[in-house]
Amino acid sequence: MMNDVTLLAAVVQDAPVPLWVIDEKGLLSLANDSAARFLGYRRGADLQGGPSHDLLHRHRPDGSPYPSHECPIISLGSAKASAEWFVTLAGDVREVCWTTKPVGTSGHVLLTFAQPHRRHHETMNSHRPLVRQMSTAGSHTRLHRELSQVIDERFVDPSFSTASLADAAHLSVRSVQVIFAARGRSPAAEIRRRRLDHARYLLERGMTVQMACHESGFLDASTFARAYRQHFGFPPSRTLRVNELPSPPLSG
């Protein structure tokens, strides 16, 4: 009687869709030719026994290291579906949708993947310029502009952080920090500056300190007041008081 993996190998080898079997050590147990060709290789058999993670995406789209322990594909013990970027033999980045499913009780995992459907492709493709620009001349300037736009759109969300910014751009946190460091800033400082400028704008238009705090993405009033004083040199209450002063009477 054939075991689970032997039966699986017999069934999937000629399948027209990419199929990829990972063993309990994270090594490639089986890949059909469709999967191999998707990644730029000639035959699946040539990849057998290699490290699955490195064969799929040996680095992140921005070129930074992608540690295998951070890869959701090989760290999952149950069925899962998600999206990722794979890296071909030639170094090209390809967006994929993938699913995993345990193979019986063998400890092996069956991975299937394909290019995303149109709606998901459009979502992932919106970040593709960021990935492509990482390796072109003037990339930091363009990326800084794109990342700043993301900050402008999301800074009022209290949970928005440097990690959120990196995730939105499909870059590593380190890459985002390098891009901002080239301009003498950090992404965290830029997010905070945007929040404080917005808070001052609201205070100048009569909003209370408490409301301006929360509407600008701060959760804690004391943290907000301290950051505001450090940035502008005076407390938020002063901005509010100045703008509440009555207008001088008209001389006649």
Image (cartoon, rainbow, N blue to C red):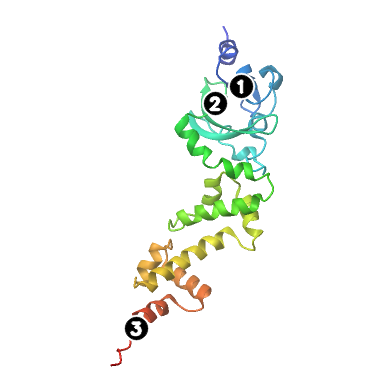
Front-lying residue, 146 or 209: 146
Is there CB contact under 8 Å for labels 2 and 1? yes
Q: Residues within 10 Å of mark 3 (few under 14, many from 20)?
A: few
Counting from the top left corner in percent of width and height, residue 64 is at 67, 44
| Location of residue 233 in the rendering, given as x and y in whole percent from the top left corner | 51, 78
In primary-sequence order, the first of circles 1 and 3 is 1
Q: Can you identify the residue that label 3 sits on?
A: 245
The reply to whether residue 32 is visible in this rendering is no
Q: Earlier in the sequence, mark 2 or mark 3?
A: 2
Numbered disc 3: secondary structure: loop
Q: Who comes first in sequence, dot 2 or dot 1?
A: 1
Q: Position of residue 120 (x, y in %)?
A: 47, 34
Determine which residue is flagged by label 2. 113
Residue at label 1? 35
Q: Which mark is residue 15?
A: none
Label 2 element class: strand
Q: Is residue 193 above or below residue 4?
A: below
